[in-house]
Image (cartoon, coloured by chain):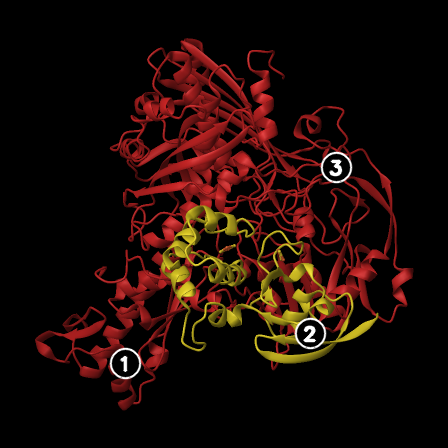
Chain colours: A red, B yellow
Amino acid sequence: MNTAAPFGERARRREDGPLLTGKGVFLADLIRPGMAALRVVRSTRAHARITHIDFSAVANDPHCLGVLSAATLPEGMGRLPAIDLVEGSLPAHHDILAREVVRYVGEPVAAVIAADAYLAEDLAARVAVGYDSLPPVLNVGEGIRADAPLLYPQFASNVVHQTIQRVGDPEAAFARADLLIEETFHFQRVCASAMEPRGALATLEPGTGRSLVYSSTQIPQILRRELARLTGIPVERLRVIAPQVGGGFGVKEAVYAEEVLVLLALQRFGRPTYWLEDRQESFLASSQGREETLRVRAAVTAAGEVTAVDADCLADIGAAYLFLSNTPGAAVASLRGPYRIANFSSRARSVVTNKTPLNVYRGAGCPQTTLAMERMMDLAAQALGLDRAEIRRRNLIGPDAFPLDRGVSYPGCGRVIFDSGNFPALLESTLEAIDYHGFPARRAAAGERTLGLGLSFVVEMSGGGGAEPAGIRVLPEGRLQLLSGITPIGQGSATTLAQILAGHLGLPLTAIEVLTADTDQSPDAPGTFASRGATLGGNAACLAGDLLIREARQLAATLYELPLEDIRWQNGELIGRAGVPEPLSLAGLITKAQEHGIDALRRLQVSGRYERDAVSWTSACHAAIVDLERDTGIIRVLDYAVTHDCGRIANPLLVDGQIMGGVLQGLGQCLFEAQRFDERGVPLTQGFMDYVLPTAATAPRFILRHIETPSPLNPLGMKGAGEAGCSGAVGAIANAIADALGPQVPFLNGSGPFTPECVLAMLRRRGGHHEA
Amino acid sequence: MQCLDIRVIVDGKALTATVPVRLLLSDFLREQAGCGGLHVACGHGVCGACTVVLDDVPVRACLLLAVQADGAAVQTIASLPQLEGCEPERGLTPLQQSFRRYHALQCGYCTPGLLVATAKFLAGCPSPDRARILEHLNGHLCRCSGYANIIAAIEAVRA
Ligand code: FES
Ligand code: FES
């Protein structure tokens, strides 16, 4: 492989030009005069039987272009898909519009179509929906009680999904342990809060009459398949395009009712129809993340070796599966992180509650397990009087242990086999970056202020989702179009993929255009999630590049009547043995072929599938230093160090961007963010006024370092980089806050959020009785 | 729905329109004045994505009605060169270049509002220290970047 050129460079992004000048085309920019607006009538109850839906106030309004409700949906219409079910999962899927029962505030009940969004909102407000309230289930503790109200009485339980794992002999290890630690961690519900809300638009494609759906989605190819299944439109009569996506983070990795509704409206009423989510709807009806209760027990020897861990996870997945709703529980499989811990058992259950459906959110369960494991390490160190770095050192998997079968499996991604890594090196690098040894002196010098330092390791699955196709088209002037299935969501994948392919072929970056996110252009691929874009998209691009090289060599061999072995590909050119032919560029080859009446452009069009198992494990060691203001309870994260190992790095500028962005999301979860509900299940946070996101002033000083342990699983040696920043941050920050508070303060285990009120409450409990 | 006639200068071009009184300035600019670079992220004045300059003052277009802009001049991302005091049509402005160089944008949804607001901020305060920059950025949410690169990009262009 030729990597002399662009692979590994801090290349500026090709995406930036239009975005900087306001010319980026996002979903809302596709709306044209004459298109109709759809407004969803949403449930105002958390749990209720629908007694009636009365459209009479709008039916005769001249502004009303159409209405939809469950009663008018096509006969036998399917329900929204989930792709991470295991054997025994109960089918808690949603209908497109609620039938008979609503199960969360915000659930789509009906839809109204009008000439513009203002009129549609007016009309929607006049649709009268009658409800008979049912008792809501608002947390997992209630949900698993034998006498709990049931969301789906036909299942006889609110537990809809369960996975159990076991490695070694945990009972024996617990029996022998010198120290037992048991903690219960609570993780609040958070909202991914991509800055661009969701949106969808259905129109007819001029010329072909096919249905063309635009959606701000991470998964256009899957969306097309599901739209075909749900509406009965043949898949080849459907085209789905994701325009510029203004942030995803998992919230746009699902098939939602609104995407189906705009297409139904187009079919039914013949008008191109759009739906744009407003921010309040994002808080009610876009997926939410994280909520779970995780009980962890650890067996530890006097020397600080953790010999067994047992975990019980109850994930609050809301009212139904969305798409990948069970990952919080599944992620428990990787709870042990970078530590040997020979014995392990876990049970993870997903519980339905009367809240907005949960879906993956950046990190997909790993932030919770990371925080829990890293807190356990600190608690063990404290109980044994060991240094926090030292206890980690004593438990880390060594650099020679790979590949390492962890003895568990990750639903949908097979066995957990760590492919490579160097955890001790990550630890020492991060300790140095944060000046761990200088910290006690720094703390002592801080005077009035109280500083705390927290460490956290993350080992995170990346690159799941299955095989990845890619294709290459050659343009007459010799430039290439890479047809990729990786949908850009702000991570700069077009730049990264172009770098990878340019490096592989020995061509300049400018010779490669990346086409994606359009089911007509891009191959039928899983999409963008699970930190898979660069690794899978990149390796698929190289595979297609190899096919292109073969075709080009074959074509040259034919044209020059030479044996194939006499033609090599080198630095972007075809080179003949003994100087015949003279070094030939792709453009030259095309011209030459044309002289012979050969359609080179067709011959050079290639496509392939990267089929190899590419689930690799990205690792990182994080350290945070926080400052606690004791009188106000305000926490600030001052310094933040990460040593990150995502294998070989195609573009460090962009990887650093992913890490910092991820860390800030973890910081937000720990310090500010929480989606709360009142006792009737009504969300109390419905906008950025009350859902607090991190701002620039909360950003720490970053010290980022990289170790590149290539993954042996793919030729490029890459691993994913999209999520480990977020997953590691919650652990480091929670540990730093606990450290600042000191061991006498009963720490609220979990991700808080550690708002000033929460911190002051913990400080008040100091020395007093510990509230349960 | 009651409508009113308004006259607005948008990015240097004079426009007249008859608009419903309840039409938001953000929707007017996007749908009738062709300002697709104006992004709406929260719709209630918190995130700054929709920032435009109205008669020399940065405002949130999602919090104003189109009729409130009657008689005013509005500058959006298309006026960034003027806001930075450089020649229009000469490629990226120094601020845009700095954002690109420091990778201060990922999805780019927050970017136009941030650039407009920052250009205006720097015009009034050409050499801000870090604290002033943070204070300025407080009114802008970015969910992707982690902010550090935005701060660095602004520090790099201050006088
Ligand atoms: S969209 Fe106007 S401030 Fe957020
Ligand atoms: S770059 Fe995505 S919100 Fe700022």
**Disc 1 marks which amino acid?**
Ala
Same-chain status of marks 2 and 3: no
Characterize the local packing of mark 2: few (<14), some (14-19) or many (20 or more) Cα atoms within 10 angstroms: some
How far separated are the C-alphas under marks 2 and 1?
56 Å
Nearer the observer, A599 or A418: A418
SS of the residue at dot 1?
Answer: helix
Residue on which the image places disc 1: A587
**Disc 2 marks which amino acid?**
Gly
**Above or below A353: residue A437:** above
Same-chain status of marks 2 and 1: no
Res A131 visible: yes
Kindly identify the residue that appears in the image at 23 percent across and 59 percent down.
Answer: A3
Asked whether the beta carbons under mark 2 and mark 3 sit within 8 Å of each other, the answer is no
SS of the residue at dot 2?
Answer: loop
Q: Chain of mark 2?
A: B
Asked whether the beta carbons under mark 3 and mark 1 sit within 8 Å of each other, the answer is no
Residue on which the image places disc 2: B71
Q: Position of residue A114 (x, y in %)?
A: 78, 68
Residue on which the image places disc 3: A681
**Above or below A515: residue A756:** above
Q: Looking at mark 2, is its residue's CB closer than 8 Å to ligand 1?
A: no
Q: In which quadrant will I find the N terminus of chain A? A: bottom left
